[in-house]
Image: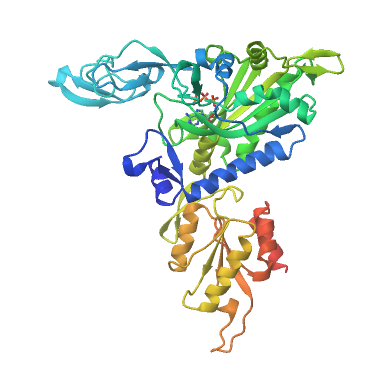
């Protein structure tokens, strides 16, 4: 994780928020490459799950909503974590996380010497187990108290109870609240889904692990409404679609690069199911901090629509033409975290390799996710015609893709820099491309494309670059593209 944090800062992926003031607690800023990577993940997710599917539509709702939304959804009453405070140092911990922390111990068997003991283990000198604050090792912990994770603010000029509003802790509720609007305006038939990607806020007690758990983050959520009276392949429709979404989401993460053996499904036990859920399955990823939740896929039944119907007094039903009856749809919710997805893609892409006795750091991003698609590099920056040609190629390719020009180092160094940020292809312009009149050598108009992963190179007429990158960035693999170029 430390390697990723330092690479992120050094190469402009992620910075600590307000760093010059000492940083703000568990919020992060995406830098020039991070913002490209993040928006690529979001765009590809939207394209695959919304644009390409006939049964999906999207919305983009406000972060601030009517406060009753959170009463109806259960967040005001249930969106809490148990927390304990240290009476000495005042640090606050999630009660269910304390035993997972290494703990500080002043050991009586060694004249009160201070030790840091691994999580869950007893002191090897005196055999004691942790009872006090794991951090300072001195203070007693309070009994657990419930702490609501929603950020509170005020709407309007007066700070009074009547004007309390909350920053949304999930995007999902906007899909339920807008169910009727979307259903009517788009004339939809069940099953259909509403998607949204946007910011959510949670005042997490123990945030951390870089962008894994933060107080402000982005979610990509889908609410997929099904008719609970329908059956598919002999099973209730909600159960069928729940399994379909689990498979589709898992396949999506694999398609964009996450290793098969770093992904697993985790079924929630009955005791940990949320108050609304009939069944929840997490997709876990093997993060640098260990196996943790990447996304959750819950069968929320008709809980939310019924709750909002009750609290708003509006009917939130669907008319089943076949059975001539109004039904409250069930909903399957695939909910992913964008920042967590970015961390997973980055961790999975990171490789340290040895090339001709030297270390090469490379981010093997899927080309669709890579922040920069192509870097155009002049082999000799003293030659005006080479620089001019390289810049013109960059400008032409940049009409379609994020393409950079760089001439600030020797070519080997420039390649390494692009490898480190995951740029899948480099184009070099050399003397042969533009010719050398002094030596009587004519221009061949060809440039070299270098593939990040194999480091192989092919020579291509410069005026065919658009078509070649159209193929390569559109999913054709390097070997096929190279063979095609070879065939002319
Ligand atoms: P966790 O158990 O890790 O707190 P959760 O089960 O509460 O997560 P959900 O409410 O299911 O999370 O939210 C869906 C997704 O949103 C999560 O799988 C995760 O990817 C992302 N997410 C939730 N909380 C955070 C956070 N504090 N920081 C970053 N991403 C988050």
Up-down relation of residue 134 to residue 197 (above or below):
above
Residue that appears at 37% across and 33% down: 25
Q: Is residue 213 left or right of residue 263?
A: left
What is the number of callouts on the image? Answer: 0
Residue at x-position 63% and y-position 28%: 334
Q: Quadrant of the N terminus?
A: top left
Where residue 154 appears, x then y in whole percent? Answer: 47, 24
Viewer-proximal residue, 307 or 274? 307
Q: In terms of depth relative to the viewer, which is nearer, 196 or 119?
A: 196
> Could you tell me which quadrant the C terminus lies in?
bottom right
Q: Is residue 315 visible?
A: yes
Q: Is residue 25 above or below residue 464?
A: above
* Whether residue 430 is visible: no
State whether residue 146 is above or below residue 187.
Answer: above
Q: Relative to residue 390, is residue 192 drawn left or right? A: right
Q: Position of residue 147 (x, y in %)?
A: 42, 16
Counting from the top left corner in percent of width and height, residue 280 is at 60, 20
Q: Give me the residue at 64% from left, 16% from top.
A: 304
Q: Depth check: 412 or 14 in front?
A: 14
């Amino acid at each position: 994780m430390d390697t990723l944090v330092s690479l992120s800062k050094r190469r402009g992926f992620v910075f600590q928020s307000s760093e010059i003031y000492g940083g703000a607690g568990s919020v992060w800023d995406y830098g020039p490459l991070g913002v490209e990577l993040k928006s690529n993940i979001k765009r590809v997710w939207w394209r695959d799950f919304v644009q390409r599917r006939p049964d999906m539509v999207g919305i983009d709702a406000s972060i601030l909503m009517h406060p009753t939304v959170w009463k109806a959804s259960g967040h005001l009453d249930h969106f809490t974590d148990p927390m304990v405070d240290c009476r000495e140092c005042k640090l606050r911990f999630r009660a269910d996380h304390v035993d997972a922390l290494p703990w500080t111990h002043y050991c009586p068997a060694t004249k009160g010497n201070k030790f840091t003991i691994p999580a869950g283990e007893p002191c090897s000198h005196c055999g004691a187990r942790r009872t006090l604050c794991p951090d300072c090792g001195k203070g007693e912990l309070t009994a657990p108290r419930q702490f609501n994770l929603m950020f509170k603010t005020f709407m309007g000029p007066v700070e009074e109870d009547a004007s309390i509003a909350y920053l949304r802790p999930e995007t999902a509720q906007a899909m339920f609240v807008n169910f009727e609007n979307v259903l009517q305006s788009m004339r939809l038939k069940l099953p259909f889904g509403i998607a949204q990607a946007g910011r959510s806020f949670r005042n997490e007690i123990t945030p951390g692990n870089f962008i894994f758990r933060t107080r402000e983050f982005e979610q990509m959520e889908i609410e997929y409404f099904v008719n609970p009276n329908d059956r598919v392949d002999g099973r209730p429709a909600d159960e069928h679609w729940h399994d379909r979404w689990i498979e589709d989401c898992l396949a999506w993460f694999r398609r964009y690069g996450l290793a098969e053996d770093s992904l697993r499904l985790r079924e929630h036990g009955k005791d940990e199911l949320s108050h609304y859920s009939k069944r929840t399955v997490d997709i876990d990823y093997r993060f640098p901090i260990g196996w943790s939740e990447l996304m959750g896929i819950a069968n929320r039944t008709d809980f939310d629509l019924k709750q909002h119907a009750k609290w708003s007094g509006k009917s939130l039903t669907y008319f089943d033409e076949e059975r001539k009856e109004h039904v409250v749809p069930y909903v399957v919710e695939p909910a992913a975290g964008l920042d967590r997805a970015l961390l997973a893609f980055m961790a999975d892409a990171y490789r340290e390799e040895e090339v001709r006795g030297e270390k090469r750091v490379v981010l093997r991003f899927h080309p669709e996710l890579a922040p920069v698609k192509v870097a155009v590099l002049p082999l000799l920056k003293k030659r005006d015609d080479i620089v001019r040609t390289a810049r013109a190629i960059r400008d032409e390719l940049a009409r379609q893709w994020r393409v950079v020009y760089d001439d600030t180092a020797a070519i080997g160094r420039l390649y390494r820099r692009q490898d480190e940020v995951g740029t899948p292809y480099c184009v070099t312009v050399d003397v042969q491309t533009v010719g050398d009149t002094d030596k009587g050598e004519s221009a061949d108009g060809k440039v070299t494309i270098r593939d990040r992963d194999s480091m192989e190179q092919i020579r291509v007429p410069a005026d065919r670059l658009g078509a070649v990158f159209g193929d390569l960035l559109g999913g054709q693999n390097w070997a096929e593209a190279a063979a095609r170029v070879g065939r002319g």
